[in-house]
Image: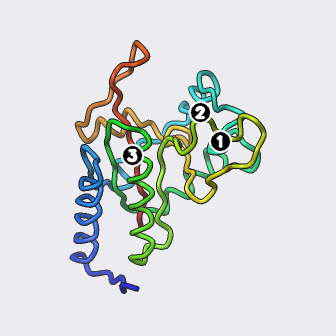
Amino acid sequence: MKEISADKKTFTDDKERYCRLALSMGALNARVFSLDDIVFDQRTIIKCMYGCDDWGKGHTCPSREGSLSIAQWREALDRYHWGILIHGDKARLNQDISYELERRAFFDGYYFAFSMSDCKLCATCAGHSGEPCRNIKKARPAFHSVGIDIFATVRRFSLPIETLEYEGEPQNWYAAVFVE
């Protein structure tokens, strides 16, 4: 296992390597963020409650039994200092990229690395039929479901994100890996 030191060059090299990996896997953009770049807003949960088909059913939904509260998520995420924001045009690919970056960071010694993306591992979440999660090791929550304003956060990086008026319009998908 690689030894992690407080040397800035090591962290900088890792940040650049993770961005290059994301791009090589198909991300349109990959940006290093600091926790100060992340915009928290508890109103995101209102949009989840009133508009998301996963509410009360999906395994990565904050409404599921045993999930952390928004305040608990904020407290946990406040322990991170940086991560990688991933932009793509395919939700499942973004999730695969973010999970792979989490995995690589873990093996690099960042054992608390944690990815977040809209879960698209299954065509229909098993939670909708009351079954256990089929991909418990890879399923991850979305930003907005834990109190992160994805629109305000992404706009800080001048990346594209817009509300969509019609189903079928091209979408910009975002994932992130909180590393350290």
Side of 88 where 179 appears, left or right: right
Q: Nearer the viewer, residue 59 or 148?
A: 59
How many residues crowd around disc 3 within 10 Å: few (fewer than 14), some, or many (20 or more)? many
Q: Return the mark for residue 45.
A: 2
Q: Return the mark for residue 62.
A: 1
Q: Amino acid at mark 2?
A: Ile
Query: What residue appears at the point 45 percent right and 71 percent down from the top-left corner?
Result: 106
Contact between labelled residues 2 and 1, with CB atoms less than 8 Å apart: yes
Q: Amino acid at mark 1?
A: Pro
Residue under label 3, please give it: 94
Q: Mark 1 and mark 2: span between their CA atoms?
A: 8 Å
Q: Nearer the viewer, residue 99 or 74?
A: 99
Q: Mark 1 and mark 3: span between their CA atoms?
A: 20 Å
Sequence-wise first label, 3 or 2:
2
Query: What residue appears at the point 42 percent right and 78 percent down from the top-left corner?
Result: 109
**Kind of element beneath mark 2:** helix
**Kind of element beneath mark 3:** helix
In front: label 1 or label 2 = 1
Q: Amino acid at mark 3?
A: Asn
Contact between labelled residues 2 and 3, with CB atoms less than 8 Å apart: no
Quadrant, the C terminus: bottom left
Image quadrant of residue 43? top right
